[in-house]
Amino acid sequence: MGPVSPTRRDPVLLGDLDLDAPLPRLEAGPRGREARLLVRVHTRPVGEARIAVPPRGLTACEVAEEAWPQVSDAVTAHLVRDGRPVPDVLPVEGLPSGATFPSLPPCLSRRHEERPRITVVVATRDRTDSLLRTLSSLAGCEYDVFDVLVVDSSPSTPGTEQALRAAAPWPFPLRYVATSTPGLAFAHNVALECGTEEVVAFTDDDVQVDRYWLAAIGEAFADPEVACVTGLILPSELETPAQFWLEQSGGFARGYDRRRFSLRHPAPEPTFPFAAGRFGSGANMAFRATWLRSVGGFDRATGAGSPARGGDDLHAFLRVVLGGAELVYEPAAIIRHAHRRDYDGLRRQAFGYGRGLGAYLTAALWAQPSLLGPMGRRAGPAMRHLLAADSVKNRGKESDFPAELTWLERAGLLTGPFAYAVSRWHYRRLTRPSRTQASYYGGAPLARPLPGGTSVS
C-alpha cells in the first residue's frame, strides 16, 4: 500500500473555558481557525464547545453566544444538582462566584473530605524532556498528600536520572527506580514493589496532568467499593493529520458523564464487560494498592515494550469488574496527551493497539478459561463494533481517514494471541527485575524499602 498524502488542516485551538471566571477573548491567525474548548463548571468538565474563530478573533461576548447553546443543558443539569441558580444566558463575567453563597457547592465540598495518600507512577524510557514536562505539570496539582515514583524501563543512557538529579529539589517527594527489564506492565509491577501509598495512580511520560487530577481521583476512592478509577484523556494539540486521525478513530476520551462499572451495575453495551476500552485507558488509571497487589499486579506479558505491545490496562480493568469490585470513570480526572505527530508513528500505534487488544483477550482466557463461553456469546456484537461503519468505533472517521490504519489495527488484532504466547515465553523466568537502582530526589524523604535492599529514610 502506497504512502498516504497528508491532508491540509488548520491547527485547532485547544483550551479550557472556565464558566466560574470571566470569559476570555479568542485570538486567531490570518486564516482563522476552530477552537475546541473544554467547558468546566466548579472545576468539572461538562462538555466541549466547538467554535469557529474568524481572523479578527472573538470577543468574550461572542464566545458566550457561541458556547452557551452547545453546553447549556449540561451546565443547567450541573447547577440544578448543586442547588445553584441557572442563568438564561451565559454571563460574560462568568457564573456567580462562591462568595455569593454561604458554602461551597456540594460537588466541591466533597473534595475536602477524606483524602487518600496517592503515589503517582510514571514509567519512562529515553524520553527525558517529555518526562520533565509531565513532572512539571504534577507540581501544579492541588493535592497535598502524594508522592511520585519514576520507573526507568531499560534505559539506553543515564540521561533521565541525571536530569532528575540536576532538577532537584522537586516540590513533591520523588523517587527514581531503574530496571534493566523492558515492558510497561513489568515497570508498573516494579512500582508496586517499591511501597506505594493506599492509592497508586499511573500515567505516561507524554502527558500534562490537570491541576485537579489527583483531587478527582482521591474523591472517587472515598467509596470503599471502588478498586479502580479512570479519567478523561484529551489531546494536548491538534496540528497534524496524524493527530486528527487518532481522534477520528476514537481517541482516548470516554465522555463527560461519571460512570460506574461492575457486575452489579452492568453497562448497556452488548459487549460488556469485555470491551474494556470503554472503561478508560492506561495513561490515566488508578487502583487501590492493596487490591492490585492481591491480584499479583499486572500481567507482565502484556503492555508496551513487550511482544504483546499492549493490553495490560484492559486486562486489569476486566479483572476489577469480574472480581466483584467497582471501576469508576471520573471525567473530572483530566490529563492531556501528546498524540503522535507523524503518520509512520500512527501506523505503528494502530497496529500495536490491535495487537494489544488481541493479547488482552488471550490473557483473559489464559487466566480464566471459563470466559470462553461468555466471550463467544458476545462475538457478534464485537464484530459489528469492529467492522460496521456506523459503530461507535468507526462513525467518527471522516472521508480522508486512511483505510490503511483500519486494516493495520485489524491485522494487529489477529497477531495478538501469538504475540501474547511469545511474550509469556519471553518473561517465563522473570519474577523480579534482574537489576534495579533506587534514588531519591526532592520533597520530604519517605521511610520505605526500595528494590535491591536499598532504603531511604
Image (cartoon, rainbow, N blue to C red):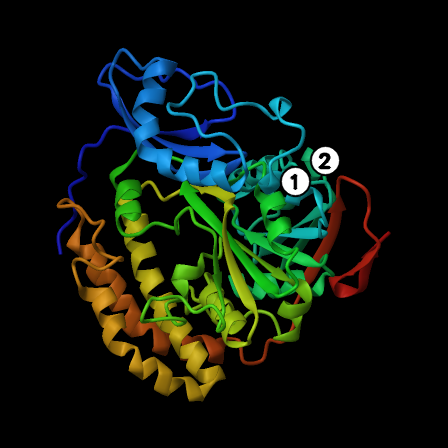
User: Which-is-in-front pick, marks 1 and 2?
Assistant: 1
How busy is the neighbourhood of tag 2: few (under 14 within 10 Å), some, or many (20 plus)? Answer: some
Q: Which residue is mark 2?
A: 171
* Residue 366 makes an appearance in the image: yes
Along the viewing direction, whichever of 310 and 322 lies nearer the viewer: 322
The picture places residue 39, in percent across and down from the top left corner, at 42, 33
What residue sits 62% from the left and 74% below the top? 296
Q: Which mark is residue 109?
A: 1
Along the viewing direction, whichever of 212 and 20 lies nearer the viewer: 20
What residue sits 34% from the left and 49% below the top? 251
Mark 2 lies on a secondary structure that is: loop
Along the viewing direction, whichever of 197 and 19 lies nearer the viewer: 19
- Does 219 sit above or below residue 237? below
* Residue 180 makes an appearance in the image: no
Judge left or right: residue 102 versus residue 270: right
Along the viewing direction, whichever of 103 and 304 lies nearer the viewer: 103
Q: Quadrant of residue 293?
A: bottom right
The single residue placed furthest to the top in the displayed view is: 56
Q: Find out whether the residues at labels 1 and 2 contact each other: C-beta distance under 8 Å.
A: no
Query: Which residue type does callout 1 highlight?
Result: Ser
